[in-house]
Amino acid sequence: MPLMDQNMNVVWASVLIEELCRNGLEHFFVSPGNRNAPLVAALAHHPEAAADSCMDERGAAYCALGFARATGRPGVVVCTSGTALANYYPAVIEAYRDHLPIMVLSADRPPELTGSDANQTIVQENLYNRYCLESLNLPCPDPEFPLAALAARICHVARVRTGPVHVNCRFREPLVPVPAPSGPVPRSVLAAAQRYFAGSGPAIVYPRVARCCPDLSDVQKILKNAQKALLIIGRLETEADRKGAQALAFKTGWPVFCDIASSLKGAVGEKELFFLDHPGCRALIREYAPEVILQLGSGLVSKYYYAEILKNRDRFVIQVSPRREHRDPAFAVNVRIRTRVAEFCHDLGEIRFSPRHGELSESLVRAVQTLAARLQQATPDDRLSFPMVAEIINRHIPADEALFLGNSSTVRAFDAGFGGVGKSVRVVTNRGVSGIEGNIATSIGFAAGSGRRVTAVIGDVSMLHDLNSLALAATLPAQVIVVVVNNQGGRIFDRLPVREFPEIATPMMTTPHGFDFYHAARMFSLSYAKAETPEAFEAAYINALDQGGCQIIEVMLDSATDLTVFNDRQKIK
């Protein structure tokens, strides 16, 4: 039995960890410290708790985020007092924006020390403010605080599955499993603990409530009568969402665009439009002039979808997304249905889609496919560029694996890729707030949670932001191939208007650095390969797939060459 009874701290910690495990929260990412020793002791003695040691707190939180992306269950981060939990903040914000469940379990000092200039003490209660769905601030373990109440409160926050929660645990000495100077744990508390551990299941039963189906009759009429329509598939939440969206794409017969984070690019049939941001494609869509746009999911990578395609107010836009908050940066949505895509597709029922202007959609698709062929011909295959990196990975990544895409130029290159990944490859992104930190850690957490190997494609600045997480790659049993595209800084700014103002852009934005990552790989004993040509990268990636384990492939990308390829592709008509 995992109950520890040497002092009140470990009794409370035992009940807390047991209740989390009973609610399915069994994977913990533990940051080092002393104040959290009671929690670590309870984890060490619990037979079902899986605990990974993560030296860097920011990496630990992103690992938990990746785990949540893979499983839909909260990854639990455990830390000591002070700034430790502040280092979790970026991942907490990403989890809030992307409806991902993570739990922060922070240890804290006694309340009398807060504000007293005691070492390693800050105000930890409600630290995450609006970015936390639930905050539970526990007192120091007290015989007068019923263990049944503790278990019930933990059970309540453990049931949250749509964002982060924070449990702040105050502890007085002793922090390790030894008798307390104040005397043994009262018999009444031990009896209550033993009764709790003799039972099973969560402290509170939350019965499933039948979902109230929205009235879709008006939406059905709009979709059924749509003459010139466009289906847009954004980021999707679950495999059920992806199956529902894919089936609806085939059923409508409409031109369809799949955002890279939908994991459906290249998997929705002959009517697929493979990019939205190219000037030629935007011109073709303007000419087509869709009257109805059905958007499944939100958070598209495409800038011009919001800035241009939705700009025409004559279009009727229906958005389906379970996300809270306003998810319409173009302020163009006419009907918003807040439900999961899979549930919408099911509730929509059988509709016969028969647009009278089907020949116009056929013409749009043919024109976009012709444009795509010209783009492929205009992309040199003897020089490395972001489009070439995307093409090589799309060609070789095995079915049913995962592809993590860093932000900035990386995700845009894959979003514009012709052919897509297909093959049931799960595409993972941190697009809630599109940060460049925590990319490696997220990939490792996703690999650990899903059991899939992950190919993580990130930029050099993202790599520098998350070097500490290479320690996780070296120690955790998860397979990640890190493809770092080194173009010496944030070169996406070369494509933006700020390029006309070099005194602004360099070095504060482009951040040129002159580093490579050979010695970083050696420091963490990771396999390393460098590629300076498409052939070398293709060979290195194939070898990494065959070799297994965690590896680093550094792609040396000349920023001037990549910019030339980008500009040449933009001119194709």
Image (cartoon, rainbow, N blue to C red):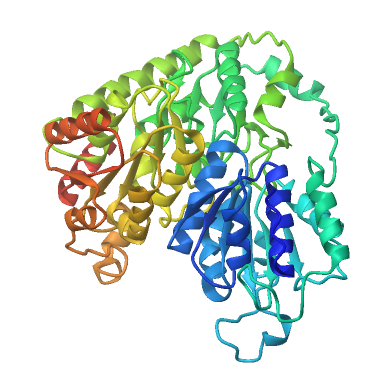
User: What is the total number of numbered labels drawn onto the structure image?
Assistant: 0
Quadrant for the C terminus in the image: top left
Residue 286 image position (x, y, % from top left): 47, 30
* Residue depicted at x 36% and y 35%: 414
* Residue depicted at x 62% and y 62%: 39
Residue 432 image position (x, y, % from top left): 54, 49
Q: Nearer the viewer, residue 60 or 293?
A: 60
Question: Is residue 246 positioned above or below 416 on the image?
Answer: above
Residue 249 image position (x, y, % from top left): 56, 17
Question: Is residue 397 positioned above or below 566 on the image?
Answer: above
Q: Quadrant of residue 6?
A: bottom right
* Residue depicted at x 35% and y 31%: 280
Residue 477 image position (x, y, % from top left): 40, 42
Instruction: Answer with left or right where residue 84 lies relative to residue 549.
Output: right
Does residue 275 show up? yes
Question: Is residue 267 positioned above or below 448 on the image?
Answer: above
Q: Nearer the viewer, residue 276 or 451?
A: 451
* Residue depicted at x 24% and y 28%: 546
Q: Quadrant of residue 481?
A: top left
Q: Quadrant of residue 317?
A: top right
Instruction: Answer with left or right where residue 79 lies relative to residue 406.
Output: right
Does residue 290 show up? no
Instruction: Answer with left or right where residue 207 lies relative to residue 426.
Output: right
Instruction: Answer with left or right where residue 39 lies relative to residue 472.
Output: right
